[in-house]
């Protein structure tokens, strides 16, 4: 398929969204649900052939972004880039506006929900300043000098279900749709606050152990086709099996086995989109049993691997 030319289109004006030009292919897969000047919700769903690279300054706000599909990199000016992928959530807030960058490669399935509150709207919704909970985050890429917080963490199941509900919303009546989206935005805020409060009570992991745990996560992401066991992964990063088993959920949001399975299935989906056969994708991602692969894929993606390219919204490239 011929790549779509980059024809920048100015984003519809909303006080919580930066005025920035983005490719028309990306505007086509986004849907804005702006409830009022204090709340904006945007849903992204599609498979753009070209990438997105935005460098813009945004207003003071509190943002919750939930990634169901797609990988991205984002940063606040002066801070380190944060890499996020499927199953992750990102919280961003600041006392004043901040400049940042958002990058998302093309050629991948994108399902993303972005919820933004103004500072006044956050307070009216029952929120509170969140910087005091910064230490609860798994991936903290904040810039304290500018009063900006940006951090990622594994999205809890309730938040993932909420994002899917937003993307699948079928309400046509304007009033019903507005009420539905407002309810989902409030629910997302409640889930994030509860998750952060729970995380703040977890016993801290030493800096060295956190680096080793992060290394274990990177090994799985880079070499998902290998036969990883808990003992082998522990030896690779220099941790005991007990510490790896106990600490890994704090950097990945799930057990070693569950995370390895999720990474393998995500890689398999990408291979299928690139033209691989089902058997090839299964073997390349470490699944020796084809029926087990098909069952796991259906449970994670909602469709059998042989029908992955037939799902709505997919365009063959």
Image (tube, rainbow, N blue to C red):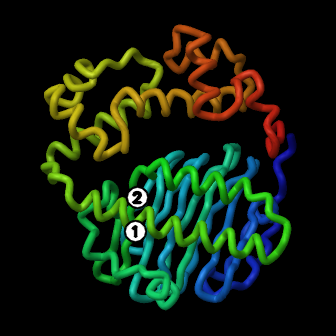
Is there any visible trace of residue 122 in the rendered image?
A: yes
Q: Residue at coordinates 74% horizontally, 30% vertically from top-left?
A: 308
Residue displayed at 66% across by 55% down: 165
Using residue 42 as the reference point, say whether residue 249 is left or right of it: left
Residue carrying label 1: 150
The residue sitting at 37% across, 26% down in the picture is 257
Q: Position of residue 34 (x, y in %)?
A: 70, 78
Give the image quarter of residue 279. top right
In this rendered view, identify the residue nearer to me: 51 or 142: 142
Image location (x, y in percent) of residue 224: 45, 25
Instruction: Compute the Cα span from label 2 to label 1.
Output: 7 Å
| Residue 307, disc | none
* Quadrant of the snapshot with the C terminus: top right
Determine whether, in the image, residue 267 is placed left or right of residue 50.
left
Q: Vertically, is 255 above or below 109?
A: above
Residue 144: x and y, percent?
A: 29, 78
Q: Quadrant of the N terminus?
A: top right
Asked if residue 184 is positioned above or below residue 13 in the image, the reply reads: above
> Toward which corner of the image does residue 181 lie, by quadrant?
bottom right
Mark 2 sits on what residue? 152
Can residue 21 be seen here?
no
Say whether marks 2 and 1 touch (CB < 8 Å): no
Asked whether 237 or 61 is in front, the reply is 61
For label 2, the SS is: strand
Q: Residue furthest top?
A: 289
């Amino acid at each position: 398929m011929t790549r779509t030319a980059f024809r920048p289109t100015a984003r519809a004006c909303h006080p919580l969204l930066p005025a920035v030009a983005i490719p028309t292919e990306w505007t086509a897969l986004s849907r804005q649900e702006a409830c009022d000047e204090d709340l904006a919700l945007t849903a992204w769903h599609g498979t753009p052939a070209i990438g997105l690279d935005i460098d813009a300054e945004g207003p003071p706000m509190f943002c919750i972004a939930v990634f169901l599909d797609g990988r991205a990199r984002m940063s606040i000016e002066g801070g380190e880039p944060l890499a996020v992928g499927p199953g992750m959530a990102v919280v961003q807030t600041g006392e004043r506006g901040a400049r940042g960058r958002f990058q998302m490669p093309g050629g991948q399935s994108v399902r993303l929900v972005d919820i933004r509150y103004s500072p006044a709207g956050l307070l009216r919704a029952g929120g509170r300043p969140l910087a005091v909970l910064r230490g609860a985050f798994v991936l903290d890429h904040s810039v304290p000098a500018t009063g900006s917080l940006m951090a990622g963490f594994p999205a809890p199941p309730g938040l993932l279900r909420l994002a899917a509900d937003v993307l699948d919303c079928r309400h046509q009546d304007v009033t019903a749709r507005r009420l539905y989206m407002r309810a989902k935005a409030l629910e997302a805020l409640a889930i994030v606050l509860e998750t952060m409060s729970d995380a703040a009570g977890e016993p801290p992991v030493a800096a060295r152990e956190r680096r080793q745990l992060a290394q274990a996560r990177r090994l799985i992401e880079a070499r998902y086709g290998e036969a990883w066991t808990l003992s082998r992964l522990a030896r690779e990063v220099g941790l005991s099996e007990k510490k790896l088993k106990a600490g890994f959920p704090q950097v990945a949001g799930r057990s070693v086995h569950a995370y390895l399975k999720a990474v393998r299935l995500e890689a398999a989906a990408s291979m299928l989109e690139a033209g691989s056969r089902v058997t090839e994708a299964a073997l390349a991602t470490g699944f020796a049993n084809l029926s087990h692969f098909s069952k796991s894929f259906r449970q994670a993606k909602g469709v059998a691997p042989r029908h992955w390219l037939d799902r709505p919204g997919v365009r063959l490239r």
